[in-house]
Amino acid sequence: MGQRAFYQQYFYDENVYDLHDGGYKKLAMPAVPEKALAMPSVLQPDRVQGHEAWYTIVAQTGETAILPGKLTQTWGYNASLLGQTLILEDGWHYHVHIENHLPETTTLHWHGLNIPGPITDGGPHAPIMPGEAREIEFTLHQEGAQTDWMHPHPCPNTARQVWQGLAAMVIVTDEHAKNLPIPQEYGVDDLPIILQDRTYHDNQLDYEADYDVDGTLGTVPLVNGTVNGVFKVTTAQLRLRLLNSANRREFRLHFDDGRRFTQIAGDCGFLEQAIDLDRLMLTVPERAEIVVDFSDCQPGDRVQLMSDDAVLCTFEMDEFTKKAQAIPDHLFDVPKWQVDPDSQLQTTVMSGMDDEVLLDGKRFDMTRIDRQQLFRQTVDWEVKNTNDACGGMIHPFHMHGCHFQIISRNGQVPYPNETGFKDTVGVNAGETVRIRVCFDVLGIFMYHCHILEHEDTGMMAQIEVYDPKHPKTYDLKPMHEM
Ligand code: C2O
Ligand code: CU
Ligand code: CU
């Protein structure tokens, strides 16, 4: 093991952090007693046969103890809030029965899974009416193990439904991941860390009251739906699967004692090389897997995870039952995709703020196919954020149905933690990010700014991935006609 590269800054451009926004709300841990950090349980399949499994997912309403006093009305997947975690195996075939027990129409989007669109993928073309169900099936072909998630995607109600609580982690695993010397025991040393912010009004959510067209922010930090959570650490090392599933907030993560950690994965799998950091910024809905080593701690010691100057949760040391392992420098051979010389460079432009946000100068229209890309053709895209007026803001650009590689930022090498596959990239104001995109599933897919209120306002478009040998037609209707 050589000297690992160590980085001491947040990446991204300080000038365009969300905290410079007029509507910014600071996070602050309320004075509530500590409680055990919630650990979503693992959703068990209804049935498994060979490399095939059947699951039932129920979008439901419920009540959750979040703050002292009254229970909070919340929504979740197979749970009152957030959801149970799905652990999937790359290469397996899955059948999923999705039930909607909510009082309104929803969809279930598999953020990060390369599965056909627009129905299986679960975007706005795949509504499930209240009291109804939908069956989907897919074979997983990922570029490796990764931390993904599921969330609703009805147009234009994604933001409110996520705010209400719908979001669950989806872990994809494979043999390569299982053989790496990294923490692997779910809930013990391999933890989902779902980062969100909310505001409560007499312990209830009030999305309309807190709504911000540039992305709704809350002042209360939550990790896995817990406010002021404490996790008892029983192993010298923890692997944290960080998911920023806030509507808009950027999390600028660090530990209160400044300890270093090792980032091993980004959105869609392992980085080529592990890197050491003491600060990490995640825009919505980026993911990062980090490994933290507490070997230097004694039982009773406490280390807090922070964003800027707000505490998010606390790790409290117990007796360690497992020693730390050396994290390998090289984690994954990221295939070096070459752009197809017959392909055309694509340009996509995110512009505006407030209710003026546009993608390629347009508002989303479910009946319009905005562009096409050939199945399995590797194409470069330039993703521009022209929104540099009044300081501008970061727009996190996300694509369904594919993973991409980040080639450059304004012609410069990308950030050192962008060497793996991604499905979301935070694009700074005034910046052009070049990404390399290849789809190996067919269908209609969304691409959009993942600030949920921007998406709902219409900063979204759709691409058809086509195969001339298997032409398809799509009957695209607006949601109200379905
Ligand atoms: Cu998280 Cu259109 O997706
Ligand atoms: Cu998605
Ligand atoms: Cu945006």
Image (cartoon, grey):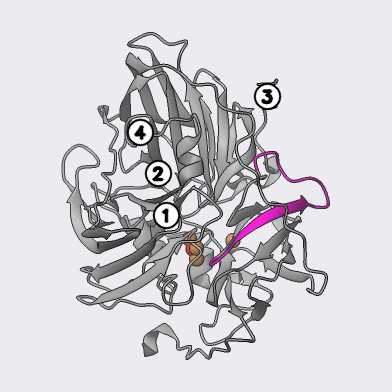
Q: Quadrant of residue 75?
A: bottom left
Binning the other alpha carbons within 10 Å of mark 3 as few (below 14), some (14 to 19) or many (20 upward) gives few
Left or right: residue 163 versus residue 101 is right
Left or right: residue 398 versus residue 475 is right
Of labels 2 and 3, earlier in sequence is 3
Of labels 4 and 3, earlier in sequence is 3
Q: Main secondary structure of the magenta part?
A: loop
Q: Quadrant of residue 347?
A: bottom right
Mark 2–mark 3 distance (CA, rounded to whole Å) = 27 Å
For ligand 1, tell me if the residue under mark 1 lies within 8 Å: yes
Judging by the rendered image, the residue that carries numbered circle 2 is: 194
CB atoms of marks 2 and 1 within 8 Å: yes
Badge nearest the viewer, 2 or 3: 3
Picture coordinates of residue 321, whole percent (x, y):
33, 17
Q: Amino acid at mark 2?
A: Ile
Mark 2–mark 4 distance (CA, rounded to whole Å) = 17 Å
Judging by the rendered image, the residue that carries numbered circle 4 is: 185
- Quadrant the N terminus occupies: top right
Picture coordinates of residue 190, whole percent (x, y):
39, 34
Q: Amino acid at mark 4?
A: Glu
Picture coordinates of residue 473, whole percent (x, y):
53, 91
Q: Residue at x 70, y 53 (%)?
A: 406
